[in-house]
Image (cartoon, rainbow, N blue to C red):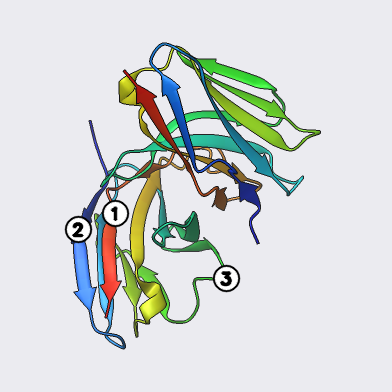
Amino acid sequence: EPEVTQTPSHQVTQMGQEVILRCVPISNHLYFYWYRQILGQKVEFLVSFYNNEISEKSEIFDDQFSVERPDGSNFTLKIRSTKLEDSAMYFCASSAGLAPLTDTQYFGPGTRLTVL
Amino acid sequence: DQQVKQNSPSLSVQEGRISILNCDYTNSMFDYFLWYKKYPAEGPTFLISISSIKDKNEDGRFTVFLNKSAKHLSLHIVPSQPGDSAVYFCAASGGNQFYFGTGTSLTVIP
């Protein structure tokens, strides 16, 4: 069964450093998403991406964040200058895109980001 | 600003009994609701959904009920099995964004 994969599983970085979190969505999916979950808190929507551009983003997704689909398979989340409060589990998800509002989103296993 | 709330952080149920997980929301514009299950070290997995035009959706052992006037939805699992032990998130959408609750950790005791 196809699945969303994410690398690395755990990333440790120093405050102020740039990080890139990588995701490989399911191959025929058209919508891609990033979510984060700070430890002990709710899963929060960050951004959705369709047709090589941001479809929707939350207020969390400020100028420090960017997303890219650099090739036909990867979907990346870049944090330009990490802050301590960026420490969280980051989940990538993808959906088929046939009915964006109701499509099932398939989540990857997550990348745990620790900012020291 | 929590638009979706799960007020019970944990729930324990005996195997074979019914598990009822509850979720409340504040935004009356939400028209699509989902439940996700999450095991440790894994991403959330879609479980069941319901749109606002329905008040019940059933899939095997899982049933979701929606009470729009109360802005409340619930997930019933019957009979509960030990493999159902996980964290359950409800989520709501009125557009392309999904708003998640904080999750309820369900433990099914054999």
Q: Residue at x 52, y 71 (%)?
A: A60
Given residues A4 and A73, the one toward you in this image is A4
Given residues B59 and A65, the one toward you in this image is B59
Q: Residue at x 38, y 69 (%)?
A: A67
* Residue B69, above or below B101: above
Q: Decide: few, some or many residues near mark 3? Use Cα within 10 Å; few <14, some 14-19, many ≥20.
A: few
Q: Which residue is mark 3?
A: A59
> Could you confirm whether marks 2 and 1 are on the same chain?
yes
Q: Earlier in the sequence, mark 3 or mark 2?
A: 2
Q: Residue at x 37, y 82 (%)?
A: A83
Q: Residue at x 61, y 45 (%)?
A: B93
Please state the chain letter of the residue tagged with numbered disc 1 in the rendered image: A
- In the rendered image, the quadrant that contains the N terminus of chain A is top left
Residue A52: percent from the left, percent from the top?
41, 62
Q: Quadrant of residue B21?
A: top right
The reply to whether dot 3 and dot 2 touch (C-beta < 8 Å) is no
* Residue A107, above or below A86: above
Q: Earlier in the sequence, mark 2 or mark 1?
A: 2
Given residues A109 and A66, the one toward you in this image is A109
Q: Decide: few, some or many residues near mark 2? Use Cα within 10 Å; few <14, some 14-19, many ≥20.
A: some
Residue A20: percent from the left, percent from the top?
26, 72
Given residues A8 and A115, the one toward you in this image is A115
Check disc 3 and report its element: helix, strand or loop. loop
Q: Which residue is mark 2?
A: A9
Check disc 2 and give the amino acid type.
Ser
- State how far apart marks 3 and 2 are (Cα): 25 Å
Q: Earlier in the sequence, mark 3 or mark 1?
A: 3
Q: Which residue is mark 1?
A: A110
